[in-house]
Amino acid sequence: AVALNITVTLPTAQGYFIAYPGGLPMRPGASVLNYMAGQTRANNAVVPLGAGGTLVIYCGLTSGTTHLVIDVTGYFE
């Protein structure tokens, strides 16, 4: 698993991010960060890794653009 700081900046519309281990048959329903247009927001998360250390970040943004910054602050074996 990895400990992350996830930051969104300059979104042009509202949306959300979901972080989860790669290889899952379905995307989880819980987001790690929700945001509105124009907001810069951050959140911490601990996310398990999939096979081979894979991590998936899903952006739930129906239109527009945003920037995502991910800082790995730690890991667990």
Image (cartoon, rainbow, N blue to C red):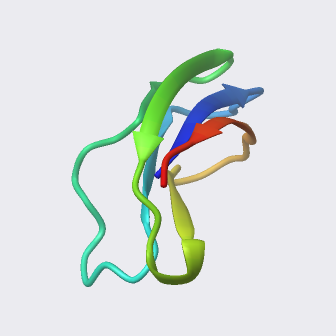
Q: Judge from the rendering whether residue 1 lies leftward or rightward of residue 52; answer left or right.
A: left
Q: Judge from the rendering whether residue 36 lies leftward or rightward of residue 7; answer left or right.
A: left
Q: Judge from the rendering whether residue 67 lies leftward or rightward of residue 41; answer left or right.
A: right
Seen at 41% across and 36% down, the residue is 32
Q: Position of residue 21 (x, y in %)?
A: 42, 66
Seen at 49% across and 47% down, the residue is 76
* Nearer to us in this view, 74 or 23: 74
Above or below residue 10? Residue 4 is below
Seen at 68% across and 16% down, the residue is 40
**Residue 10 occupies which quadrant of the picture?**
top right
* Nearer to us in this view, 36 or 20: 20
Q: How many marks?
A: 0
Seen at 46% across and 64% down, the residue is 49
Q: Position of residue 71 (x, y in %)?
A: 73, 35
Q: Position of residue 15 (x, y in %)?
A: 48, 38
Residue at the front extreme of this rendering: 77
* Nearer to us in this view, 3 or 14: 3
Above or below residue 76? Residue 26 is below
Above or below residue 31? Residue 18 is below
Q: Position of residue 48 (x, y in %)?
A: 40, 56
Above or below residue 76? Residue 34 is above
